[in-house]
Image: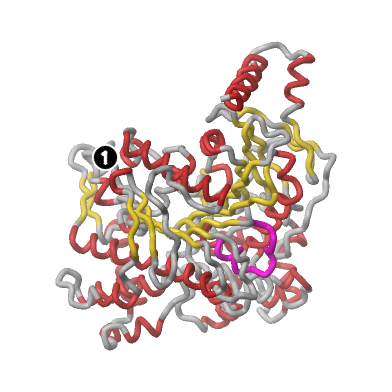
Amino acid sequence: MGLTMNRIKIAALLIVLASCVVTDDKIKDVETLKVGMSTGIVQGYMSHSAVDVVAWDDIPFAQPPVGDLRWRATRPLTAGNQIIRSKDDTACVQKASEYGGVSGEGIVGSEDCLYLDVKAPVDFQDKNYPVMFWIHGGGNTTGLKDFYDYSRLVALKDVVVVSTNYRLGGLGWFSHPAIQEDQEGLDKATNFGTLDIIESLKWVQTNIANFGGNPDNVTIFGESAGGHNVYALLASPLTDGLFHKAISQSGYTSSHSLEDAHNRDGGNPLLERGSWQIVESINEFNVEQDDSDNLANQLRDMDAREFIGLYYQKESIDSIPLTTRDGIVIPKIGLLAALSEPEYSKNIPVMAGATKDEVSLWHGLHRYFMETEYRFTKLLPPIVTIKNPELFDLWVRTRSHAWKLRGVDIPLTALEAAGNQELYAYRFDWDHQASSMFADFPNILGAAHGTDIAFVTGQYTYGPISSYIYPEGPARDQMEQTIMSAWSSFSSSATPDTGSPLKWNAFESSAPAFIHLDKNDLLRMDVEPDSMDSLLESISDHPVPTDLEKCLIVWESLINVGDPDLDAFRHWNDGFCAKFDVRQEQKDIQTRLIAEFGSIGVN
């Protein structure tokens, strides 16, 4: 009670001062929110979205990776006397996307983007709060720190939250002999975005105590690509001592060899945008790819937005090769294999999970599955319905289950093999949305990819359909209490506590326990019954999908989320899918939909 009253008094004082003429007393109070660090002096302010929370924005944690520093290891920044001012835009170069929180058209952002934000309880001075370090998602090609506001979590759970930016796409992950060949040390790395995150964690170790955070109790957490980056940090030999617990939300373990990331002459048919193909697409370059000196100079002189635009010149069904087995940031054996090696083990508590309906975020907006109809006027959104509900349900259920197995159970099993013992798994099941006359959101989206983040932030935003995806009521309130309690208790004590009598049992490969995260009456423990083999075997005789659709489901399940398992695909159901060129079939479907509707997505 005393702690809360103290915060209320401080917050009230600041609100009163904000409405008054500037006086010596106000200046003195503002000074209490000013913090000095190794990279400058930053002025704090009271958060606009939660009481008792102070925010510090746009703190530089490294030198801007511009000019000759493009495609080099992150350079530390020492600038203790500089005065830090908020910026209008700190987004790294990327394709504009409302889903990633970056507005605009085409390619936007700047290479000068290595900034982070800090939020702390208002009584941060001389405190030692647990630190939660957020890594945003977006496929490592989009996103930024500003899109997520953890003020409510800070206010309710007494934690300090740090949110960081990092280089994205081909500026954050790029492997080409012209770049790495003549560089030395860390500059020979290819995972520059990962190095940015590592440098921001070093900044935390040096400076977070000034914001009331405990540098000896840092939990990294991230969703989607952020969850993938959590795994990358767990596997990297460069991160010892930088964090003490980790949470991967809907993460994955894909990594590429240097050869595949380059993909000279298209040697890997699964990749269409290796660095070789990107360089080949630059028409004005009259330089041979093997002329390293001239090519490196021209690549570094190229406009950053123009360069990233090369990755979006045409519709593609492949993913951009990003996290790379460079033998520096990520071991040569690969990300997943490194997680299982004691040599790289951090031997720390790890929590990982997936959502029940991961892929509905994409399939629920895909023309292959969805029908649209304008029954009234095109001034209103179209009415969206599922063409074949049984097929859609099977596809989403199988692919999402495969995400849990490949993105949660298999990585946790690898960590267990390396000696980690405090491991926890979950599946986010909350799907209590409201239907609208335009769409049956519970059945189309459900517990879709990314819908769990809102319950960690307490910010219920999902664009114009927010009120349908997160309707106010007991179910939402219960889920917020459960998630915030589990995440914050894990960060403080390494044991996730949902705030209910239910004990969250640890994960063991012999009995892969996981918790169903849902509203109170559906909150329960379970044991994973399936392996990838048994999961995919269950669709071999399923009456709903066509033979091609079965093979598409199996392909997607084995190629995504982790390293492509082509052998398992070839041998599935005694070679059943050998009669199909799945990649060509995927392209043909895309071509047909674009020809008929103008895009593959529901507009």
Relative to 540, is 563 on the left or the right?
right
Which residue in the rendered view is the most extreme toward the top?
Answer: 21
Image quarter where the N terminus lies is: top right
Residue count near mark 1 (Cα–Cα under 10 Å), binned few <14, some 14–19, many ≥20:
some
At 53% from the left and 43% from the top, the residue drawn is: 147
At 49% from the left and 41% from the top, the residue drawn is: 457
Residue 224's place in the image compared with 434, above or below, is: below
Relative to 214, is 433 on the left or the right?
left
One can see residue 107 in this view: no
At 71% from the left and 64% from the top, the residue drawn is: 300
- The residue wearing badge 1 is 434
Indicate the position of residue 84 as horizontal and vertical percent values: 75, 37
Which residue in the rendered view is the most extreme toward the left?
Answer: 543
Write down the region rendered in magenta: 230-243
Indicate the position of residue 131 as horizontal and vertical percent values: 62, 46
Tell me the amino acid under the disc marked 1. Answer: Ala
- Badge 1 marks a residue whose secondary structure is loop
Residue 207's place in the image compared with 44, above or below, is: below
Residue 554's place in the image compared with 129, above or below, is: below
The answer to which of 68 and 233 lies nearer the viewer is: 233
Relative to 327, is 602 on the left or the right?
left
Is 530 colored magenta in this rendering? no
Which residue in the rendered view is the most extreme toward the right?
Answer: 81
One can see residue 170 in this view: yes
